[in-house]
Amino acid sequence: MYTKIAKYISLALILVSVVGFVAAAATGFTDAGVNVILYISYAMVALGIIAILGIGIAVDAKVDPKGLVRLGIIVVAAIALIGIAYLIAPGTAPLDYHGEMPTQGELILTDTVLNLTYFSVFAAIAAIIFGIVYGKVKGNK
């Protein structure tokens, strides 16, 4: 049942992205057309996150009700990580940039995404190192 739901969600997202691309192509990829693609991609990411959480909650509620607590902890941790990344984002102006200056909010948002990228890279490297060390320790026993 859940595979059918995931399939329909994927098909809907593909259809929406194709419609957005065609709409942008019809305008000759002007600023308005590119903005349409960006807004559609924002909506797709939001719908994907909502779908993943919704399906995860539905599956956990049926299979393992205690899994809802773990899911809640993961969601709270993700929100806390995003909040920390936002709070430490300096929002400084780019160096040697000669175009129209972004707003302070846009600069902070860009720095927040960069901080989240740094956190993700650090977490991936730490997981790889932990996996190697754990495998060596487990293998030696």
Image (cartoon, helix red, strand yellow):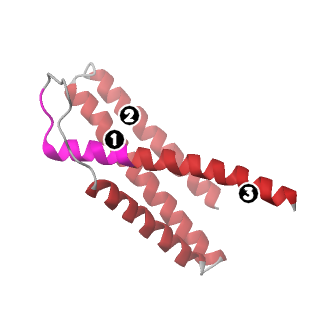
Q: Quadrant of residue 60?
A: bottom right
- The reply, left or right, for residue 20 in relation to residue 58 is left
Which badge, 2 or 3, is on the more N-terminal residue? 2
Above-or-below relation of 64 to 96: below
Residue drawn 50% across and 48% down? 122
| Of the two numbered discs 2 and 3 in the rendering, the one whose residue sits closer to the viewer | 3
- The reply, left or right, for residue 131 in relation to residue 27 is right
Above-or-below relation of 44 to 49: above
Q: What type is the residue that disc 2 sits on?
A: Val
- Residue at mark 2: 19
- Residue at mark 3: 134
Using the image as rendered, state which of residue 23 and residue 97 is in the foreground.
Answer: 97
Q: What residue span does the magenta drawing correspond to?
A: 100-115
- Residue at mark 1: 40
Residue drawn 58% across and 51% down? 126
Residue drawn 37% across and 29% down? 21
| Most frequent secondary structure within the magenta stretch | helix
Of helix, strand and loop, which one carries label 1? helix
Residue 124 position in % (x across, y down): 56, 48
Residue drawn 64% across and 48% down? 128
Q: CA distance from mark 2 to mark 1?
A: 9 Å
Residue 1 position in % (x across, y down): 64, 62
Above-or-below relation of 68 to 101: below
Q: CA distance from mark 2 to mark 3?
A: 48 Å
Which badge, 2 or 1, is on the more N-terminal residue? 2
Q: What type is the residue that disc 1 sits on?
A: Ile
